[in-house]
Image (cartoon, rainbow, N blue to C red):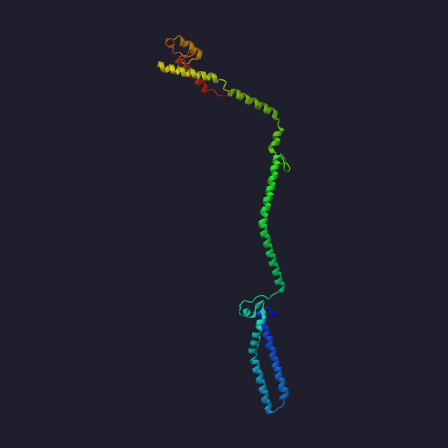
Amino acid sequence: MSLPKIQLETQSNVEHLRHQLKQAATVSLQTRAAEIIYRKYNNTDTSNRAKQQNVRSSTQAVVAGLEQYLDQVFGLASHNLQINGVDYHDAITQAQEYEPLDETLSAQIEQARLAKDQLMVKVALMRREFPKKIQALVHTAETRCSRARGADAVVGPAPHPRIHPLQHAVDAVDAGALVHDYAGCVGTIAALAQPAGVPATTSKLERASQLLAIWELTFHVPDPNAMYDDAADAGAQADTGHGRRCRERGLVAAGGLTPRSARSGLLKRLHGNSRTKPY
């Protein structure tokens, strides 16, 4: 059967006990010696004085050996002592002293340790369970949103339209006249830019290619200063000898134009088109 050990707080408690025990033993010895001297050797006989001195010497010898006696007593009792929860021999050899053991504080520390362990277990469970719960919530939200989009349902309140501050000033202006004028302007530009003369231009380019082919065959370099209109070119060129020779050879192009008239007419129209805007 093991008995509970005697709990001490610090090493100074052991020193205090040693001091109290030594002081009590010393006082007890001195008191007992005085009683012996008073009762037995209280007369003035010379032999009694010697005996009194002998008693005092014996008392001093006992007091001197009291320190060794205390060491033996605490050595035997050390196995049943603990200093702040540490065995006596280990506590005596340690240079650093520990705080006194507080049972209430020790119980609070133990409760805090248990609470910490419980919280750690709870956090570990949350780390495993919460991602699954969040994934399920996200999946549910995505399913609801997809259903709402499929049914053209409005999820939540419709946002308020944002109106630019300048929109109020624009709304105050009568836009009907502006839109009408703008539409008319766009129509006019479209009419001007419409390639209405594309067929005529294409025919002129075909005639020019034919006339250039005739010019290459006849090797006749037209005079660039002689620029006439199409009608004037046709009338004037028809009476010239070169025109007659071309007609006799069958080299006159469709429309009765010669290379000279084609050259002059093409140059004149290109010169005029270069100064004309497309709208």
Residue farthest toward the left in the current orientation of the protein: 219
> Which of the pair 201/140 is nearer the observer?
140
**Left or right: residue 6 compared with residue 248:** right
**Image vertical order of residue 191 relative to residue 60, above or below:** above
> Residue 71 appears in which quarter of the rendering?
bottom right
Position of residue 211 measured from the top left corner of the image (x, y, whole percent): 40, 15
Res. 263 in view: no
**Left or right: residue 43 compared with residue 223:** right
Number of marks:
0
> Which image quarter is the N terminus in?
bottom right
Position of residue 57 measured from the top left corner of the image (x, y, whole percent): 57, 85
Q: Residue at (59%, 51%) from the top-left corner?
A: 125
**Image vertical order of residue 244 relative to residue 7, above or below:** above
> Residue 108 appears in which quarter of the rendering?
bottom right
Residue farthest toward the front in the current orientation of the protein: 1
> Which of the pair 222/110 is nearer the observer?
110
Res. 217 in view: yes
**Image vertical order of residue 40 relative to residue 137, above or below:** below
**Image vertical order of residue 218 relative to residue 161, above or below:** above
Q: Residue at (53%, 21%) from the top-left corner?
A: 190
Position of residue 245 measured from the top left corner of the image (x, y, whole percent): 36, 9
Position of residue 168 measured from the top left corner of the image (x, y, whole percent): 62, 31
Q: Residue at (59%, 54%) from the top-left corner?
A: 121
